[in-house]
Each structure stands twice: as C-alpha cells, then as structure tokens.
Image (cartoon, helix red, strand yellow):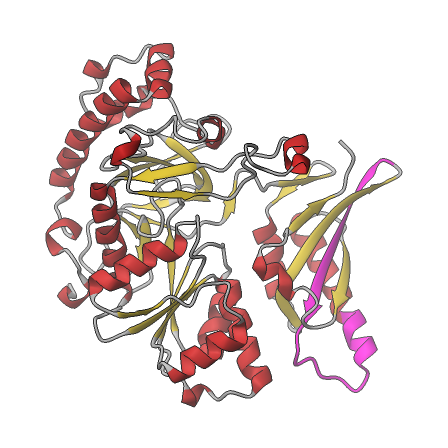
Amino acid sequence: MDQVNLYNPKCETIPRDELRQVQFERLQSTLNRVYRNVAFYKAAFDGHRVNLERITDLSAMRELPFTTKEDLQRSYPYDMFAVPLRDIVRIHTTSGTTGKGASPHDAALGGPKPIVVGYTQNDLRNWRECAARLLTAAGVTQHDVVQIALHYSLFAEGFGFHQGAERVGASVIPASLATGVAKQIVVMRDFKTTVLISTPSHALNIAVSLDEAQVSLERLSLRLGLFSGERWSDTLRRQLEERLRIDSIDTYGPTEVLGPGVAGECHLRHGLHINEDQFIVEVVDPKTLAPVAEGHEGELVVTTIMKEGFPLIRYRTGDITRLNPEPCPCGRTFLRMAPVCGRTDDLVLVRGVGFFPAQIEGILAECSGISPYFQIILDQEGGVDTIQIRVEIADDIQSLDKVKAIETLRLEAAKRIQAVLDIEAKVILLEPGSLRRLAGGAERVVDRRPG
C-alpha cells in the first residue's frame, strides 16, 4: 500500500463491512430527509408504495424508484432542492436551454432545460474532500503547479478540480477552457505547469499546436494529465502520453451527481475508484432495469448519501460501465468502475443495426494515417438510411502518390467498419485540422433523417 497516495487513509481503506454499515446509515438519513423535503420524492415513494421502515439493508434499495434526467429537468429550477434556498451557497447547472429567459427560437423548439444543482456549505466541504482524494490518488502534491483548462462558468468542472487542488496544497492556474490554445502553451511554459487538467480533445489540440509552433517538450515541466468531460479511447490516451510525455489519469464526475470527485484512477490506473462513503452505485440493464451480473456492463445508477442541497436517489446516469469489486493493490477498498464506454442515449440505429460512436472511434484508431477527429452524418436516400463518416487524415501521412494513399486509406477504413459493425458506411477523408473544432463541443453525430 502506498500511503503517500492516500489523502484520507481512514476513509479510503475502510473495511468493506464497515463501509456498508456507514452507507446504510447515511442512506436511511437521506431517504427520510428527501421524503420530508422534496415533493418529487414524496410522490415517487408513495406512488411505488415504498415503506421506508422496510429499507433495512442496502439490498432493499431495489424497492426504491429511479430518478431520471427528465425528472431533474422538469424540476427546473429549484424543485429538487432539499433545503431552503437561503442554505444554498453555490449553484451550478448542466448544459441545456432554459426555456425561461431563453431566446424565442429556443422556446419555440422546446429545448431541454438545464439541471440546476445547489450546494450547501457542507456539500462544498465534502466536494473538496472528494476532489482532493482524486487528485492525491493521481499523484498530485503540494509541489505541483496545476493548470486547469476547463469551463469556469455555470458548469461545475473547473471549480471542482480547482478547490480540490487548493485543498491538496498545489499552486493552481485557472486557465479556463475559454483561453486560446496558444496562450495555454505560453502559460504552461512560462509558469512551469506540471499538471494539466482538461478534456482529452483539448489536450490533443495543445499537443498538435506544440508541434505546429515547434515548441520543444524540453521547455515544459509537464508530467501528469487529468482528463474529464469526454469519453476517450485507449488510442487517444497513448497519443497524449507520447506527444506530451505525461502520465494520464481518467476521472468521472457528472455535475448533477456532484462534479469532479465522484471517481478517478489512482496512479496504478486499473479502474476508477468510486468515493463510496459518499455514493452508493449500482449497474443495471438499461432496458429491463434489473441488476446485471457482477462485472458485466450496464447503466451506472448513483445514490448520493451525503449531499444536503441536491440529493439523488437511484439516479440513472445514462453512462455505460461495469464495476470491479476486486481490491486494488494501492490499498483503497472502494469499488472501481471501468471507463465509461458509451451512453444509453447515444446509441445510433442504422438499418436495424445499433452501435455507439465510441465503436467507430476504436475502429478508426486502428487505421494508420487517420486522426482521432471524426463526425458521423446520418441521412436517408430513397427512404433508406445512409451513414457517412467524415474523418481527418493525420498530419504526417507521407507518400509519393498521396492521392492513391488516401484512397487506399479510405477503403481500408470503410472495410473495417463493415467487418466489425456489419454496416456499409461512406468514409470521407478531410484535410488535417478540418474537424478540430469538434473538440469545442460541436455534435459528434448529426442525424438528418426525417422524423
């Protein structure tokens, strides 16, 4: 066990039987509180004939109803808060069209409202604790200079990591995702950044720009990267580690659950440790909602057991993962989750075949000469679904007959997609840099099909 990489050894190495007792006691308190204070949960529990006195152990949680993203959106803005607004000291939101105060165009479209999350002083204290554990597990110390290139706005990303890094004692640079890549590099070089926290795609943009600007890695002090906000492939992870010469750490923390600090890899990188003294997690079949067998993939469901302002009971995250109950050599006793491999709401159906964009990413990653940037265009011709994959070629493609090489590459990519997914896709190769703007949040999948 590496005590150096434990922020709170008493909590992070708690025996499993003691942990279950702590979880149950906190669950009981949370259930009674939401039943008294949140009209949604009172109605949901009554509607499912839930008798809280029958919840006598964690297995009885299956009697409780699920909470969905749509439930939270319908509660806009404050209906899910379990404390008076005067006790809320911080408010963050997910993305979404507010409806109230939105443009007439947005209102006419009836766009989804954001999920509004409130935090009490105790919530912020626990959030800082969870984020500090995650950063310490990754190897961040008081000697590091941490550059945070994430949103500092209504979104929780930047603030979550920021407060955790300060709790650890590191020097924090709130660079923000809004700061241009060129300036990020200048700050990284001049301020001697040792840890970069960003989305994987933004880190790749930095790596590409370093090459274009011919900035030598020897001029940087970077050693570690913590990434969040996007799913990323093993191939992209290897690219980032090679191009930036860093160790990379995966993290997980939806805003509605808490924000950064729900789970993260330790320095051994064998799955993301979940802060189970704060959250009870389940994995269910997204179609039947029944529990899946241990170690099998399904939808992650989270119950918060320490949040005061915005507690959630059996919240369906929509994220597809699996849990690993085996003890980690690092000494932590918390469950580990595999990196999120897809979402229940981004399954693409084409001519009766379903696939996730991450599968396309994995296939393209095996094609030498193709960059990680791609876009899926769905349409119809003569009433038949069509699929087009637009993908950048890599900067370093070299050939005496470049046109022939690109055509060979295009055919190879299409052939691999056909072989793996059993769908016929038209692959279009684009010049390097054509799709890099997608890293800023443009749609990965564009569905132009009628209806």
In the image, is residue 321 above or below residue 75? below
Q: Which quarter of the picture shows residue 314? A: top left
Residue positioned 54% across, 40% down in the render? 96
Extreme-right residue of the structure: 382
Left or right of 205 on screen, residue 117: left
Quick one: quadrant of the C terminus?
top right
Residue 201 at x, y percent in the picture: 53, 64
Q: Identify which residue is drawn at 39% across, 84% down.
A: 190
Q: Is residue 171 above or below residue 379?
A: below
Answer left or right for 396 relative to 386: left
Task: Give the number of callouts.
Answer: 0
- Compare residues 428 and 112 and report the one nearer the observer: 112
Task: Indicate yes or no whether the magenta region holds residue 393.
Answer: yes
Q: Position of residue 351 (x, y in %)?
A: 74, 38
Q: Is residue 271 visible?
A: no
Residue sitting at 53 percent across and 38 percent down?
344
The quadrant of the rendering that contains the N terminus is bottom left
Can the viewer see residue 23?
yes
**Magenta residues?**
383-408
Residue 289 within the segment the image draws in magenta: no
Q: Does residue 108 appear to the left or right of 130 in the view shown?
A: right
Q: Is residue 355 above or below residue 361?
A: above
Please identify the quarter of the rendering in which residue 137 is found: bottom left
Q: Nearer the viewer, residue 161 or 322?
A: 161
Question: Residue 437, how many percent across, how many down?
Answer: 63, 63
Q: Position of residue 40 (x, y in %)?
A: 38, 20
Instruction: Name the residue at 50% across, 68% down.
Output: 179
